[in-house]
Image (tube, rainbow, N blue to C red):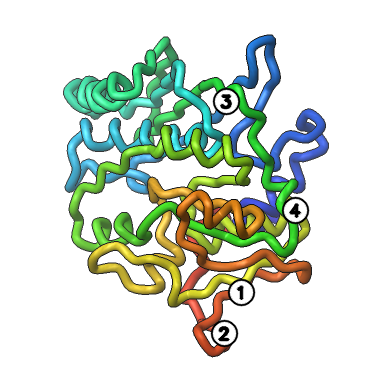
Amino acid sequence: MSVRGVGELGLLERIKPYLAAGAGGDDAAVIADATGFVVASTDMFVEGVHFDLGWMSAEDAGWRSLALALGDLAAKGAEPLWALAAVAIPEQWPVDHLTGLYAGMAVLARRFQLAIAGGDMSSIEGPAVVSLTVVGHTNTMPLARAQAEAGWSVGVTGALGAAAVALRDRRVHRPVPLIEEGRRLNELALCSGDISDGLVREMEKFAAMAGVGCVLWGEDVPRATGASMQDALTSGEEAELVCAGPDELVKKAGLQVVGTLTDDGVVRVVDARDAPIKLAASGYDHFA
């Protein structure tokens, strides 16, 4: 049996026995300390999968990689502190690719006063691989996906699908992580997630961890310029956040309500008449 076809969530279930109790339910680990909560997350970015130096610069790839890694901190309301960058470098890579990658990360890091504190380098025969560990801090205990409850509303911070449109056009998209917005949403006690694999996929993660279902109202999901409904529902690498919480809190936060959590364990997308909307895919899964 190979990993292909098992799916990311299926693989997670298989490795859970080897993880610390409570680990694996969210994209970031939350650890209490004397001053609040440390939030840590790791992401990998593979050349040819997450970035393509055939039509984007190494600086763009560096910015995008760090921005998407920081999305996990934004979702937990954490202030970025430092990052570690480990890079597996193809021997044929021009040196400018490596320095450009770090230059792009550094520009975004300065924006958030984040220190790139170190990391590692290794050679590799295949495509380049960038592994980023980001660490932040928050005074507010973030809600985990497993704490989401049936009956809660689902809201998003803004229009979705911009990343999908940019990819089709081979146009560089530099997302900016919503650090300040994430802090505000967590202080309101909303359960938040970044939309790294698509809105529907994110709600499937909520469903798996909390034992809930979800109905998304496809026509209510805000779309970026040029984006289709499919784009808005399934585009990954988005800077926007999705939140779940009591309806009054979601509305108080000023979010666009796009659905509701249910008790049936099924994630569905429907139109204004409650008829199912068929999607070509629910989002990105490396192991589907």
Q: Quadrant of the N terminus?
A: bottom right
In space, the residues marked 4 and 3 are separated at their CA atoms by: 21 Å
| Residue type, numbered disc 2 | Pro
In space, the residues marked 1 and 4 are separated at their CA atoms by: 16 Å
Q: Position of residue 78 (x, y in %)?
A: 52, 28
Residue 210's label in the rendered image is 4
Residue for badge 1: 268
Q: Residues within 10 Å of mark 1 (few under 14, many from 20)?
A: many
Residue 23 appears in view: yes
| Residue type, numbered disc 3 | Ala
| Residue type, numbered disc 1 | Arg
Q: Is residue 68 left or right of residue 141?
A: left
Circles 2, 4 touching at the beta carbon (< 8 Å):
no
Residue for badge 2: 276
Q: Position of residue 150 (x, y in %)?
A: 74, 62
Q: Residues within 10 Å of mark 2 (few under 14, many from 20)?
A: some
Nearest the viewer among 222 and 87 is: 222
